[in-house]
């Protein structure tokens, strides 16, 4: 069993080393050998971390017949309990720092390992240095040093004082690069800690007293720097920054100072009272007296300004008057009549009173007027003529009776009268509703078709032939009628020509 376990460990280490040596481009085109070694390395790492994890549902990482997503889900299930456990332990340590000392005593080395332990003096010196560096306002590690950063900032400030001005975009890029370097260093430190934990995981790696104190002091130093920066900005806003403090300020702080001063200036201008020229339409009561004389105003006139009368204008007018007198042109200017651009709108007045005539009478009068049968409205002269004609007829009758020995009857005077044989409206006796005769006809009386009316889709072959033959007969009859008419016209035209020739001869 021991040999088998050693073989598995050696096989897993070989797989991990082979995966570490794989270059990045090879992952874009993976091969079966690379996939097998990756699965073996994942299985080995899972088995090594399994004793240190809690509540893991898997005894080993299953890779046979599983794809990458399923394998990753197994690993994720293992990491969640570990992360939750670490968060709980960190919270408990922050609340009760005394537990760190008890844990250190439990995991303290034995007497045989006392030689490997560092001396307390060296440890205190290291701790003093780190705490001193952290209190100064920064975090030092193997890649980022506060002294180097301060030297770099001093050099940049000297360059700016010497007349070399850099653009804001370059400064922002440098700040972004500094932040990226800090983030990268933190990530590298975290990766180193994870590798140490994989090789030899111990309780001190996660919850050591020195690291917790250092992290607490580091957090305190960050808060101190932030407080210092906010206090400096507040003093800048109040105008209490002296030249010495401004000389020690970094480029980023100077940019913040400029932005803050610009914001203060805009806010002050926004809160100040605006002049009357910037308040829109202002009446004379809302502006100072004679204040419009000091400002060049642009305004529109509702009428054309009067021309300026000069000597040249007067001389030109006198010349025009003399010319008119010499030529004898005393006529005034003829104004052109303004033609209406649009047709006049015809306003139709509707009579709301009820008509005294029926619809049939209105149609009758309209027809008689169009046909010329309607009598015009009688005038006074027509009445006199009618009366004179009646008197003359009476006189002629009496004279005829005296001059003839036989009786002569009265002549018949014809008068035009229109009789309506059929009433246009028939009044029912049951209900007082006017109903015309056309409305009382049945549908068959209105239109009686020959046979059933069919749609295009209902026609049979025989119906289509019958309809085609009917159209042909109608077309032939029309063509024959047109031919007869043309022959008759030609014959009449020939006769007229012959008659004309005979008359000429």
Image (cartoon, rainbow, N blue to C red):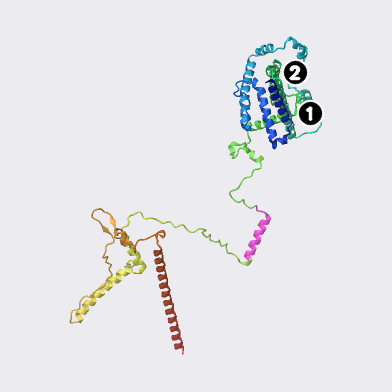
Residue 317 appearing in the image: yes
Q: Are marks 2 and 1 in contact (CB under 8 Å)?
A: no
The residue wearing badge 2 is 130
Q: Does residue 412 lie above or below 100 as drawn?
A: below
Residue for point 62% across, 64% down: 324
Q: Position of residue 171 (x, y in %)?
A: 74, 32
Please identify the residue farthest to the top as the structure is shown.
111
**SS of the residue at dot 2?**
helix
Residue 85's place in the image compared with 427, above or below, is: above
Q: Position of residue 500 (x, y in %)?
A: 45, 85
Q: Is residue 425 left or right of residue 55?
A: left
Residue with the most extreme right position: 162
Q: Which mark is residue 157?
A: 1
Q: Is residue 361 left or right of residue 327?
A: left
Q: Main secondary structure of the magenta part?
A: helix
The stretch drawn in magenta includes residue 186: no
Question: Is residue 311 one of those drawn in magenta?
Answer: yes
Quadrant hosting residue 198: top right
Specify start and end residues of the magenta stretch as a single range: 308-325
Disc 2 crowd, CA 10 A, few/some/many (<14, 14-19, 20+): some
Q: Dot 1: few (<14), some (14–19), or many (≥20) neighbours within 10 Å?
A: some
The answer to whether residue 262 is visible is no
Q: Quadrant of the N terminus?
A: top right
Furthest residue in direction bottom, as rendered: 505
């Amino acid at each position: 069993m021991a040999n088998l376990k050693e073989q598995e460990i050696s096989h897993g280490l070989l797989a991990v080393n082979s995966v570490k040596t794989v270059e990045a481009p090879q992952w874009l085109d993976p091969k079966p050998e690379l996939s097998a070694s990756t699965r073996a390395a994942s299985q080995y790492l899972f088995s090594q971390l399994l004793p240190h994890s809690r509540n893991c549902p898997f005894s080993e990482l299953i890779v046979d017949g599983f794809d990458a997503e399923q394998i990753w889900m197994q690993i994720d299930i293992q990491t969640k309990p570990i992360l939750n456990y670490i968060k709980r332990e960190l919270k408990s340590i922050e609340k009760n720092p005394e537990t760190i000392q008890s844990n250190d005593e439990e995991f303290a080395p034995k007497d045989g390992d006392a030689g490997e332990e560092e001396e307390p003096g060296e440890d205190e010196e290291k701790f003093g240095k780190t705490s001193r560096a952290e209190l100064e306002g920064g975090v030092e590690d193997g890649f980022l040093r506060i002294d180097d950063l301060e030297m770099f900032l001093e050099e940049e400030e000297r360059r700016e004082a010497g007349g070399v001005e850099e653009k804001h975009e370059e400064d922002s890029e440098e700040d972004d690069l500094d932040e990226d370097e800090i983030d990268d260093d933190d990530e590298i430190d975290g990766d180193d800690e994870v590798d140490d934990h994989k090789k030899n995981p111990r309780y001190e790696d996660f919850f050591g007293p020195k690291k917790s104190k250092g992290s607490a002091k580091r957090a305190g130093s960050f808060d101190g720097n932030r407080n210092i920066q906010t206090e400096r900005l507040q003093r800048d806003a109040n105008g209490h920054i002296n030249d010495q403090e401004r000389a020690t300020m970094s480029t980023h702080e100077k940019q913040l100072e400029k932005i803050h001063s610009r914001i203060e200036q805009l806010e002050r201008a926004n809160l100040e009272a605006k002049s009357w020229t910037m308040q829109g339409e202002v009446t004379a009561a809302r502006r100072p007296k004679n204040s419009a004389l000091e400002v060049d105003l642009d305004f529109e006139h509702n009428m054309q300004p009067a021309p300026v009368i000069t000597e040249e204008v007067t001389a030109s007018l006198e010349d025009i008057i003399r010319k008119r007198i010499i030529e004898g042109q005393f006529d005034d200017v003829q104004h052109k009549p303004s033609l209406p651009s649009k047709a006049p709108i015809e306003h139709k007045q509707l009579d709301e009173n009820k008509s005294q005539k029926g619809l049939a009478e209105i149609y009758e009068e309209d027809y008689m007027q169009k046909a010329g049968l309607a009598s015009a409205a009688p005038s006074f002269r027509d009445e006199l003529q009618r009366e004179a004609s009646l008197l003359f007829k009476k006189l002629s009758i009496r004279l005829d009776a005296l001059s003839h020995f036989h009786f002569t009857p009265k002549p018949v005077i014809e008068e035009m009268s229109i009789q309506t044989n059929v009433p246009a409206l028939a009044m029912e006796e049951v209900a007082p509703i006017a109903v015309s005769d056309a409305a009382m006809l049945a549908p068959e009386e209105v239109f009686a078709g020959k046979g059933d009316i069919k749609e295009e889709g209902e026609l049979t072959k025989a119906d289509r032939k019958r309809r085609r033959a009917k159209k042909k007969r109608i077309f032939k009859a029309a063509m024959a009628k047109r031919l007869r008419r043309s022959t008759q016209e030609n014959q009449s035209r020939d006769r007229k020509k012959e008659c004309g020739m005979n008359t000429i001869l």
